[in-house]
Amino acid sequence: MDILLIAGLWLDGSAWDEVVAPLERLGHRATPLTLPGQGDGSTSATLDDQLAAVVAAVDAASGPVLVVGHSAAATLAWMAADARPERVARVVLVGGFPSADGEKYAAFFDLVDGVMPFPGWGPFEGPDSADLDEDARRRIASAAIPTPAGVAQGVVGLTDERRYDVPVTLVCPEFTPDQVREWIAAGELAELARAKHLDLVDIGSGHWPMFTRPAELARLLGAAADA
């Protein structure tokens, strides 16, 4: 199966480098996406630009597609399922939850000169970064790409309720499947609550398993594609 890999904020397609080879050994075609505003020198890219790039990749695939979204890009993967529910065979969300229609995409941190720079490790201390050693922290921070304001502040648009028919796998890194069930029951994850086919799988890592547990993450993505 074609697997499209979308990394979260401040990351480009290279974040998946250690995941691609294991996926291909499992017989899948893995394509990490580097989207507009991710290292191309553009600070004017918008959420619509990034969605258009993901949808173009879905359309270019030879058959049904598995779309993987990490962290904030869980929303982008879900938007792709909304735009192409007949083409997206499954969505895999890694450490993130899809925002609802009308919400801002990722307005989490302050903007500086039209971009949202990586804020440093302070906001991520604890379970998010517990499995990152100092070398990994330096490498991620030094490669971090400021997110254009038009992406971070973009408004999520969801229009096709057929998205709820698309199977969803949520990979749980710094939180557990039981916590997700509690959040859904409490009404905190409205889009996931309406998904008709939701699988929760635990990886027991920090927020960035593509760096700390790439082989295990590839195995989980491969199993989701096989499903």
Image: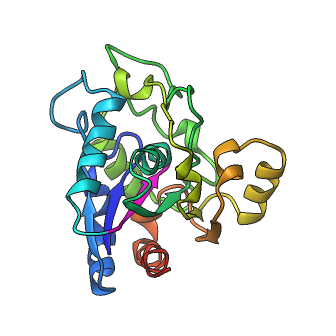
From the image, which quarter does the N terminus lie in? bottom left
Please state if 35 lies on the left or on the right of 157 as rendered.
Answer: left
Residue found at the very far left of the displayed protein: 41
Residue 12, given in percent of the width and then of the height, sits at 28, 48
Residue sitting at x 48%, y 59%: 132
Residue nearest the viewer, comparing 212 with 190: 190
Q: Is residue 90 magenta?
A: no
User: On screen, 60 above or below 147?
Assistant: below
Residue 212 picture quarter: bottom left
Work out whether 183 lies above or below 154.
below
- The dominant secondary structure in magenta is strand
Where residue 184 appears, x then y in whole percent?
A: 77, 51
34 left or right of 222 in image: left
Q: Quadrant of residue 143?
A: top left
Residue found at x 63% / y 71%: 202
**In this view of the protein, can residue 116 be seen by the observer?**
no
Q: Nearer the viewer, residue 153 or 54?
A: 54
Which stretch did the figure color magenta?
A: 64-71
Nearer the observer, 144 or 191: 191
Q: Is residue 11 above or below residue 46?
A: below
Residue located 27% across and 59% down the image: 32
- Percent position (x, y) of residue 102? 56, 25
